[in-house]
């Protein structure tokens, strides 16, 4: 079983939450440290709005990014205390998302998709075509050919 670095997963999952908290901290600092006038209020409002937008991104993306281990016979999705196992015939599609260094997994009978990181960085070829040259990429490519996945 090959899995990506957990630090990369947690950084990507909670980046927007931390960035939104930083924006709100800056807004609060500006608002309370400087005398109240229209300019100070507007600048603080801009940082609060940026924090709200980042928090909305966090809410949208955090449940879609998962830790995944890929093996020769199965794919395991780690969800807190439980692990969900899928065999390769259950996979509908597995593809690389260009520019973001992510895999996109769709499973038959499940609504939505799961995004996960490869075990190593993907080598970009002019940004449009990517190829995963890691051990995880070798396993994925063999299984995609074997089961006719796109």
Image (cartoon, rainbow, N blue to C red):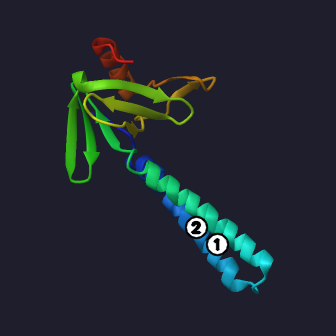
Q: CA distance from mark 1 to mark 2?
A: 6 Å
Q: Is residue 7 above or below residue 55?
A: above
Q: Tag 2, which secondary structure?
A: helix
Residue that badge 1 annotates: 26
Q: Is residue 43 above or below residue 54?
A: below
Residue at the spot 46% in from the left edge and 35% down from the top edge: 102
In this rendering, position of residue 37 left or right of residue 54: right
Q: Is residue 77 above or below residue 25?
A: above
Residue at the spot 34% in from the left edge and 44% down from the top edge: 67
In this rendering, position of residue 18 left or right of residue 74: right
How many marks are shown on the rendered structure? Answer: 2
Q: Is residue 72 visible?
A: no
Q: Is residue 149 visible?
A: yes
Residue at the spot 54% in from the left edge and 29% down from the top edge: 98
Image quarter of residue 124? top right
Label 2 near label 1: C-beta < 8 Å? yes
């Amino acid at each position: 079983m090959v899995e990506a670095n957990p630090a990369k997963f947690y950084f990507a999952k909670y980046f927007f939450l931390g960035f939104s908290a930083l924006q709100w901290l800056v807004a609060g600092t500006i608002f309370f440290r400087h005398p109240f006038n229209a300019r100070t209020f507007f600048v603080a409002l801009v940082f609060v709005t940026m924090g709200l937008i980042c928090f909305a991104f966090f809410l949208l993306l955090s449940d879609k990014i998962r830790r995944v281990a890929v093996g020769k016979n199965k794919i395991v999705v780690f969800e807190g205390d439980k692990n969900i196992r899928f065999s390769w015939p259950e996979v509908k599609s597995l593809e690389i998302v260009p520019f973001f260094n992510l895999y996109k997994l769709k499973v038959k009978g499940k609504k939505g998709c799961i995004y996960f990181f490869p075990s190593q960085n993907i080598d970009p070829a002019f940004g449009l075509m990517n190829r995963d040259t890691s051990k995880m990429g070798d396993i994925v490519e063999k299984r995609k050919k074997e089961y006719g996945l796109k």
